[in-house]
């Protein structure tokens, strides 16, 4: 498999929140790099293409957009703030 990522990702298991339009959805951050992350969600239904990923433990609020989605996971790329 060809690796297309700009930066290597590191496996983690952190609580996160997907924040958009005054709403939040809980998620688990499964891996992360300086350019993006893989998120695990109960359901991707209703999650917009662009949102803010919040990882409170790390004091992170990062604007991102969805690159891919499956039934329970999504890959996001971080946008410039």
Image (spheres, grey):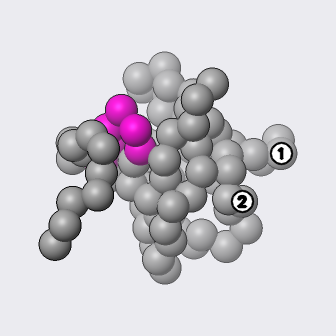
Which SS class for mark 2?
loop
Q: Give the answer, above or below, for where 49 lies relative to 34.
A: below
Q: Mark 1 points at which residue?
A: 21
**Magenta residues, start to end:** 31-36
| Relative side of 18 to 38, left or right | right
Q: Mark 2 points at which residue?
A: 48
Examine the structure image and report whether residue 54 is included in the region drawn in magenta: no
Name the residue: 48% across, 20% down: 59
**Residue located farthest toward the top when viewing the structure as drawn:** 59
Quadrant into which the N terminus falls: bottom left
Q: What crowding class fits label 1: few (fewer than 14 Cα within 10 Å), some (14-19), or many (20 or more)? A: few
**Residue located farthest toward the bottom when viewing the structure as drawn:** 71
Name the residue: 29% across, 58% down: 4
Name the residue: 56% across, 58% down: 66
Q: Give the answer, above or below, for where 61 lies relative to 16.
A: above
Image x and y of residue 25, in percent: 64, 53
Label 1 vs 2, first from the N-terminus: 1
Closer mark to the observer between disc 1 and disc 2: 2
Residue 12 can be seen in this image: no
Image x and y of residue 73, in percent: 44, 67
Image x and y of residue 54, in percent: 55, 35
Name the residue: 57% across, 37% down: 79
Contact (Cβ within 8 Å) of mark 1 with mark 2: yes
User: Label 1 vs label 2: CA separation?
Assistant: 10 Å
Disc marking residue 65: none
Q: What crowding class fits label 2: few (fewer than 14 Cα within 10 Å), some (14-19), or many (20 or more)? A: few
Q: Give the answer, above or below, for where 2 lies relative to 64.
A: below
């Amino acid at each position: 498999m060809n690796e297309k990522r700009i930066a290597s990702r590191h496996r983690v298991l952190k609580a996160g929140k997907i924040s958009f339009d005054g709403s939040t959805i809980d998620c688990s951050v499964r891996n992360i790099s300086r350019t993006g992350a893989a998120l695990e969600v109960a359901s991707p239904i209703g999650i917009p293409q662009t949102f803010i990923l919040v990882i409170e433990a790390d004091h992170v609020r990062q604007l991102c957009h969805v690159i891919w989605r499956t039934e329970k996971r999504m890959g996001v790329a971080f946008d410039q703030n």
